[in-house]
Image: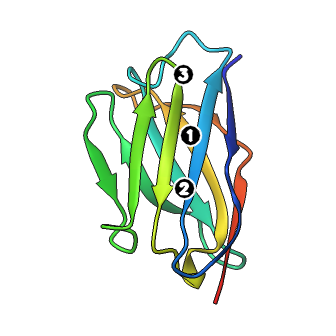
Amino acid sequence: QVQLVESGGGLVQAGGSLRLSCVVSGSIFSVNTMAMSWYRQAPGKQRELVASISSGGSTNYADSVKGRFTISRDNAKNTVYLQMISLKPEDTADYSCNMRDPTTWALRAWGRGTQVTVSS
């Protein structure tokens, strides 16, 4: 059974940086053959797509994080990262990753999330 486990969240001051990790285990799929995405959800708000990386390596970002966040993957570690710099209080949210089939877009798995809190 595929499992996604996020880590790397925490409390950081505005302007600081964090790197989130999403480790894929128990799966025959690897991060370079699936579409991987980071989402976030702040209290009282809808979940939003933050960044995604296709099986081919193409990346997409929400306008609110362009130039500050970078999604990447380490195929050997079967891990996807979200490097976040110049963090703002409005980035405060629970961040989770998911895995989708790149052809059918079928959802394969969601992680439980990691909390990011940015203080002003």
User: Does 117 sit above or below residue 90?
Assistant: above
Read off the residue under disc 2. 39
Label 2 SS: strand
Q: Residue furthest top?
A: 28
First reached walking from the N terminus: tag 1 or tag 2? 2
Dots 1 and 2: beta carbons under 8 Å?
yes
The circle drawn on residue 14 is: none
Read off the residue under disc 3. 77
Q: Amino acid at mark 1?
A: Asn
Read off the residue under disc 1. 98
Determine which quarter of the picture holds residue 43: bottom right
* Quadrant in which the N terminus appears: top right
Instruction: Look at discs 2 and 3 and give the one toward the viewer.
Output: 3
Q: Is residue 44 left or right of residue 105?
A: right
Q: Amino acid at mark 2?
A: Tyr
Q: Nearer the viewer, residue 104 or 90?
A: 90
